[in-house]
Image: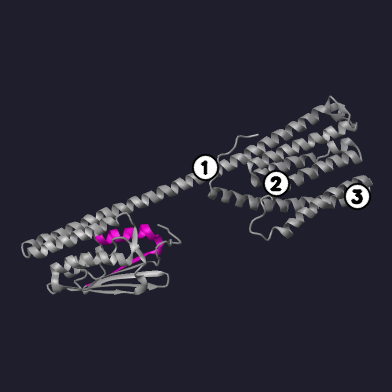
Amino acid sequence: MAAPVPPIDDAARQLLELHRDRAERLLNAVRAVVLLLMSIAALAYAPTLTPALNRVNIAVLAPALIWTVGQYLFFYRRMRLPTWLTIVNPIVDITAVSMIVGGYGLAHKTSLGLKSPMFLAYLVILGARPMTSSWRRASFVSTLAVAQYLALLALFVALGRVHFAVSPLDASGTPLISLLDEGAKVLLLIVAGAVATYATLWNERLVMQYSGESRNREQLEVRLAQAQFQRLKLQLQPHFLFNTLNTITALISQDRVQAERMISRLSELLRQSLRGDSEQEVALERELHMLRHYLEIQQARFADRLRVTFRIASDTQQALVPNFLLQPLVENAIRHGIAPRASGGHIEIEARREGDALRITVSDDGLGAATPGDKGEGIGLSNTRARLEHLYGRLQRMQISSAADGFRVGIEIPYRLAGERVTERSA
């Protein structure tokens, strides 16, 4: 009845099946209420009905009610209902309606069955298909409803139990069956089935389109974050390079041999930096190795005026940290805290694990800020803060403590090893 829908990705299919599962549970509750009301009505009218009609009611309503209640006992404790219920339930419903119509017609008068309002139950069953079925199952159920009703008409005609009248007026108030009415009912069933199938197909296409747009939006967000992250790195690396070259330039006129050593160390540092340029995170051990190359260059300039202490816990060596994280923090301490002082100063780098968090601290006892509490974030610190936000969102924290007697940067990020992922990210 409809063209095939394009394949749905796994995420969209799981979402669709989850909503169908909930709809099937709700529909079964409605089925139970309707069957219960019909059973009560059948009991109330039982004294006025013939034994044959009462047997039809019992033969149809009792198994249908048992089947409906049995689903609660056997399947509703599961997280998900069996998928075959979405096809078995409508088959049971349509067959039950057909049995009532046919049973009434065979047990009493054909006109009682064909003119019964039970025919409307076909339409109700088809109307629920978009909520619980795939378009293929909806198409099958729609075809089944038309086929069963046509089979009933054919059975009545074959048994000679139906007499048609051309005009609906002639059939009104008589046992005659209007040929025009029956044709309209069959046409109505066909149209209702086609609408149910198309509505189910339309629902699947909406889910597929929404899933595709969501996936594209997520990919664009990831690309944007990567582009922003790369932009921050491109800002940071020239900043470090220019400062280091200025240091080497200052040494050339004072100590050419030492300047050549610094150039050699800088070359090694740049090679290592470019080697891991595409990586957003590296092991802390590797980051410290890079930092020591940088400190060798700076200590060649400051000599005894620069003292560095590492306090790195052994269980943090393989923890992942943002690539090129420590160098701008140490450079900030040297440039603003140590370099302006004639006596130099001391920098302490600490890393430790606290539960699920990795805490890294870079502090110095230099000049600090001109005004206590002033964060004084330049390119290095502002880029570091932005990179942490891009990588970890609300799972990171960067605190700056500034006073006249020193400067301290504390960073907290999730403790993770290679291969592990952040469980939550919210930029």
| Quadrant location of the N terminus in the rendered image | top right
Identity of the amino acid at label 3? Ala
Mark in front: 3 vs 2: 2
Looking at the image, residue 394 lies above or below residue 36: below
To which quarter of the image does residue 424 belong? Answer: bottom left
Magenta portion: prevailing SS class: helix
Looking at the image, residue 101 lies above or below residue 223: above
Residue topped by disc 2: 87
Indicate which disc, 2 or 1, sits on the residue closer to the N terminus.
2
Q: Is residue 17 left or right of residue 151?
A: left
Residue 2 x, y percent position in the rendering: 63, 34
Q: Is residue 192 left or right of residue 99?
A: left
In the image, farthest residue toward the top: 166
- Separation of residues labelled 2 and 1 (CA atoms): 25 Å
Looking at the image, residue 332 lies above or below residue 172: below
Looking at the image, residue 270 lies above or below residue 339: above
What crowding class fits label 3: few (fewer than 14 Cα within 10 Å), some (14-19), or many (20 or more)? Answer: some
Q: Residue at x 17, y 65 (%)?
A: 297
Identity of the amino acid at label 2? Ile
Q: Residue at x 75, y 36 (%)?
A: 146
- Residue 46 marker: 3
- Separation of residues labelled 3 and 2 (CA atoms): 32 Å
Q: Which residues are magenta?
A: 380-403
